[in-house]
Amino acid sequence: MNNLIFFIIKSLIFFNLLIYIIKSFINKKIKTIKVCLCSIGKNENLYVKEFINHYKELGYNHIFIYDNNDINGERFSDVLMQEIKSGFVSVINYIGFRDKHNSSQISAYYDCYKKNNRNYNWLSFYDFDEYLELNFKNLTIQEFLNDKRYKKCINVKINWVRYSSYKEALYYEDKPLQERFNKPLLDHISNIHIKSTVRGKMKKNYWKDSINPHTSFVSYKSCSSSGKTVESQTPFVVPPDYEYAFIKHFYTKSFEEFCQKLKRGWPDITDNIVLINKLINENKNNKEKLNIIKRIFNFTVP
């Protein structure tokens, strides 16, 4: 009887020790995965801290910010001294830069992958109005990407969910972006778009010869958020796959902020006059909105 009890105790100890070793191995494996975020921005000082804190909470190891502000404009370093000193954020001077395709964004992505892909297992390429959400409480980006469903994936394509609409608010408010705009527009046509998180240590730069900031034209195996194989060379996943993750896309924010966004332009668009005229036309009977347009664009509105 004593021998049986002793054997049971020894078996329990061995079993618990085995569980501990397995858990330690899994945790160590997760911790060794390093994930960084590459972003390029202009006039984003009002939002950059919230953006950085969001990705820090998800477990990202580092954020590379390409500063594409105007020569006489604001600087990310003006509001990010603490984050830069801590080593969590690097700011790269890309002021006034445009490549042969007139796109500073793709050029910055190429540069970020080239310089950092050897040091990180995965690199995400998201804008300042894009907030990744993982559909499990307290899940880190390392745990998410370490899942076996992505074992053979080179690019994990995460769908947008549009969260912002200038129909909801006219003016900027000094509140967190995710608090100001918290209603998803699940039926919005733009939700088929994706943004990319790309595996590091690849022989060919993922962004080589790309003309689209959503995805590359390099034929690498791509997966949706649930790990399903998707077309590698298109910037869409149709229908959107929200099973394990999605990206909150605060595209317009308030009407005032959307006008400011149109004024500064997109990284790959220099002439927004068509969009501006469309905005004027849509709001020709709204005096308050027309006054906002007049103030921001500094021209007479009929």
Image (cartoon, rainbow, N blue to C red):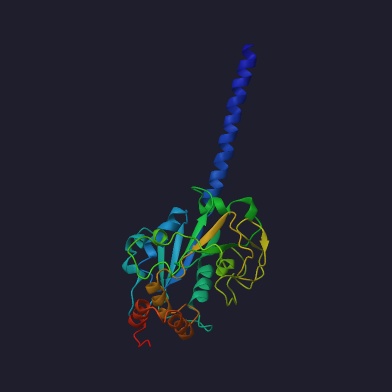
The quarter of the rendered structure image containing the N terminus is: top right
Q: Which of the two residues, 18 or 102, is positioned nearer the viewer here? A: 102
The quarter of the rendered structure image containing the C terminus is: bottom left
Q: Which of the two residues, 24 or 98, is positioned nearer the viewer here? A: 98
Compared to 90, does 11 lie above or below? above
User: Residue pushed farthest front?
Assistant: 285
Q: Which of the two residues, 91 or 196, is positioned nearer the viewer here? A: 196
Residue at 33% across / 60% down in the picture? 82
Where residue 277 sits in the image (x, y, percent)?
45, 85
Where residue 264 sits in the image (x, y, percent)?
41, 79
Compared to 20, does 61 lie above or below? below
Residue at 43% across / 56% down in the picture? 56
3 on left or right of 84: right
Where residue 27 sits in the image (x, y, percent)?
54, 44
User: What is the tally of numbered marks visible in this picture?
Assistant: 0
Q: Which of the two residues, 240 or 1, is positioned nearer the viewer here? A: 240
User: Residue pushed farthest top?
Assistant: 1
The answer to whether residue 88 of the structure is visible from this angle is: no
The answer to whether residue 219 of the structure is visible from this angle is: yes
Picture quarter containing residue 46?
bottom left
Compared to 41, does 88 lie above or below? above
